[in-house]
Amino acid sequence: MNDNMIIDLYFARDNSAISETDEKYGSYLRKIAANILANREDEEECINDTYLKIWNTVPPLKPLSLQAYASRIIRNIAFDKYRRITAEKRGGSDVPLILDELGDIVSGKDTPEAEIDRKELVRAIADFLDTLKIEKKAYFICRYWHAMSMKDIAEKYGKSENHIAVSLSRTRNKLKDHLTERGFSI
């Protein structure tokens, strides 16, 4: 079943929309949650919360890509859950490292000015990604969108972990320069 058909099920308030979403994208969404969280029950809770959020937002929203929409939702839910879980303890996952790697470039300041600039920042990052070679863009998305470990990225692309780490470091530096040139304070 294609995305438009599944979205039509949501608009019709047909409960099978959730099972169709799970059939088509469930394993993909579980992988994103698993990359962020280290607990199967937490991952499943994120899946359920994601489907509930989709159910509550479609309609009125009609996403162009159900996969992209669902992955953004689960990613945000999983990171929120991760922050709650680690508020009192520190785990051994890659998530703190991933957030630290980008933290110097894209800060999470909660000021009104920062919120106003958020859309421009997202656009500037998207424009930057469009300038990258496909391989470097793939590494960046795997690391910072899918929260994959360096080891998993290296295995996926048949490269060494060092190659991936160096490539991502250079890409982050270029992103920092790109954003600075466009007037973002880093």
Image (cartoon, rainbow, N blue to C red):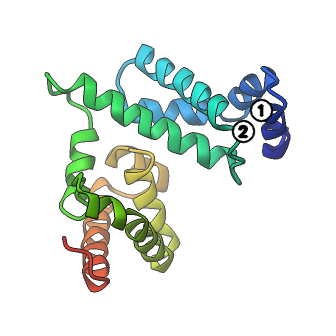
Q: Which residue is pictured at 41% across the width and 74% down the height?
A: 124
Kindly give the residue lying farthest to the top in the view shown: 41
15 relative to 22 in the view: left or right: right
The CA span between labels 1 and 2 is 7 Å
Q: Which residue is pictured at 19% across the width and 51% down the height?
A: 100
User: Which amino acid type is shown beneath numbered disc 1?
Assistant: Tyr
45 relative to 169 in the view: left or right: right
Q: Locate residue 45, reporting x and y percent.
A: 48, 18
Image disc number at residue 10:
1
Q: Is residue 160 above or below residue 117?
A: above
Q: Are marks 1 and 2 in contact (CB under 8 Å)?
A: yes
Q: Which residue is pictured at 42% across the width and 60% down the height?
A: 139
Q: Locate residue 85, reporting x and y percent.
A: 26, 22
Kindly give the residue lying farthest to the front in the view shown: 112
Nearest the eye: 173 or 7? 7
Of circles 1 and 2, the one toward us is 2
Q: Quadrant of residue 47?
A: top right
The quarter of the rendered structure image containing the N terminus is top right
**Of label 1 and label 2, which has the lower sequence position?**
1
